[in-house]
Image: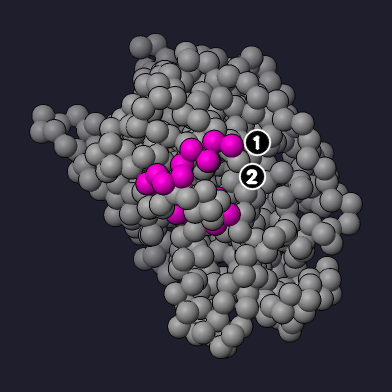
Amino acid sequence: MLKEIRAYLRRIGANAIVIPHNDDYFNEDLRPEDERLAYVTGFTGSAGMAIITPRQAVLFVDGRYVNQAKKQTTFKVLQVPRQTTVSEWFARFLRPNYIVAYDPWLQSVAQIDKWAEIFTRRGAHLLPTPFNPVDKFWIEKPKAKPVKTFAFPLLCAGKTTLQKVQPVRKILKQEEYDAFILTNADTVSWLLNKRSDAFEYNPVYLKRLIIYPKGEPVELNKNTIKALKGKIVAIDTYETPVKVKQDLIDAGASIHHLRNPFAEFQAVKNDFELKGIHQATLADSIAVCRFFAILPEKAPVCNEFNVTKFLQEFRQENLSYKHRSFADISAVGKNAALPHYQATEEQNSKLDGAKLYLLDTGGQYRCGTTDMTRTVALLDEVSPEIKTRYTQVLKGHIALARQIFPAGTTGASLDALARQYLWQDGADFDHGTGHGVGCYLNVHETPPSISPRSREVLKENMIVTNEPGFYAKNKFGIRIENMMQVVRAPFRKKGFLMFEMLTFVPFCDELIDTKMLTAEENAWIASYYTEILKRVYPHVDETTKKWILKQVSRWVNVKDVLTC
């Protein structure tokens, strides 16, 4: 493939080409026919970007994927932003009159505008290609499958499209825009109360819309775009492909930037959405508890890939369960040190003899999406190092979970809470602490997030995850993740928020070094386990009840809780 792409560069007179992990809707979960980065590089992670020149082949990935990428590709792997960024790399690579090609469907306006500043200073040029050359050279490229579209029930959505679009109409009128182009498929799905089976995990509906200050949303296509001639049209440059912007300009529209005005309304869940999410997370907690209860029996005869079938069977007993929300991260030993490791039927490790097992898993339910992670001991004896690291991760998880904070607080302001105990020991983790979660939509929903770079304000009724971890390269990995809802703090004085837990699965008692815990942390665990006994325990079989009791009994007075 490198040979063919370099020949293509010579034909068009270009010095490099950019190949991102993207489709024309910027979805994280790609259809097989859009996995161009994986086909060219061999790297199968969910985020990354390759640049190919006549003499170089470079793959840029974030900290989650560095070790995985180095195992999967012959490309030079660079970690962003720790080692460099794509912009910094361009600044070193470019020379006057250099040409870099890119697919205008796969790059956002904001990204190209950012690069254009560097290119202008270097006297270089960006070249949008009329087609994606990878598609031309892709042998036996998968064919697109037929897509089924279906309605998301109003009982789950809580609001009609007309109700959802109303506040954005006011924004357009205030800003004096004639229209807004909505290109985010996740938001389109939410707005129209529609879903589809286009993807294996995320049920997004693939359309783009024109939003007017009056009237119903209109699908953006080659016919409806003509009505925008002479109009002042707003786009979110971070979500809009360059090709869409160019089509709007060609149609005679005047383009302005406006951050997706629907994003915050989508992220702040209404009462109907919250009800569905609470039901989904409880159902998933029950299934996961049942899975971990039988794990000691199944581990000796299972591997990372096939063991999760038992969790799937438990989930499928719930009639509202649809399918997984992402591919399970099921890992033991050194594989768990890769935050987004993927076992396959062909490549996996046996659970028998492994010390730790990490499972990051989630489900799509009729009215909600779930995501959770637990790390458990498979052997009776674990090293002091493992117990220390597990407890540091747990302490960070608790610190974030129990924090009360004023309204207006960003995710970046809270992120260090989850890292502090690792930092004090000279350790860290190379991924965000938390992300937003959709409502029978994307398991990674923007804008809510908790990370060092998050500038988004956390608001009441947003849903976020809490997932600190520790990864010892080529040895083991630990992560603990719960979903949480942002709620009002119970103060007389208004304006403070806190988190309410949505995931109810015990931590691994064998891995906790109780000597490292404070009285406040012990009390938090006891309170959390009390909720597990109230919410999950009554709905599980005897085997699972015994497992729950084994995990929680030294933290709570089980008899008192169950007889209340």
Question: In x, y percent, where is residue 375?
Answer: 57, 45
Q: From what the image shows, is residue 64 above or below residue 524?
A: below
Q: Is residue 227 left or right of residue 67?
A: left
Cα distance between the residues tagged 1 and 2: 7 Å
| Residue furthest to the bottom | 96
The residue at 42%/70% (across/down) is: 426
Question: In x, y percent, where is residue 322?
Answer: 65, 24
| Residue furthest to the right | 140
Are the residues flagged by discs 1 and 2 in contact, CB closer than 8 Å? yes
Q: Amino acid at mark 1?
A: Tyr
Instruction: Name the secondary structure under disc 1.
Output: loop
Question: In x, y percent, where is residue 122?
Answer: 50, 85
| Magenta-span inclusion, residue 396 | no
The residue at 59%/65% (across/down) is: 61
Q: Earlier in the sequence, mark 1 or mark 2?
A: 2
Looking at the picture, tell me which residue is in the foreground, 150 or 331. 150
The residue at 48%/15% (across/down) is: 154
Which colour assignment does the render follow? one colour
- The label shown at residue 201 is 1
Q: From what the image shows, is residue 73 above or below residue 269?
A: below
Q: Amino acid at mark 2?
A: Asp
Span highlighted in magenta in the image:
223-244
Q: Quadrant of residue 151?
A: top right
Q: Is residue 489 left or right of residue 194?
A: left
Instruction: Name the secondary structure under disc 2.
Output: loop
| Magenta-span inclusion, residue 241 | yes
The residue at 39%/11% (across/down) is: 563
Looking at the picture, tell me which residue is in the foreground, 11 or 517. 11
Q: Name the residue beneath numbered marker 2.
A: 29
Q: From what the image shows, is residue 323 above or below residue 537?
A: below
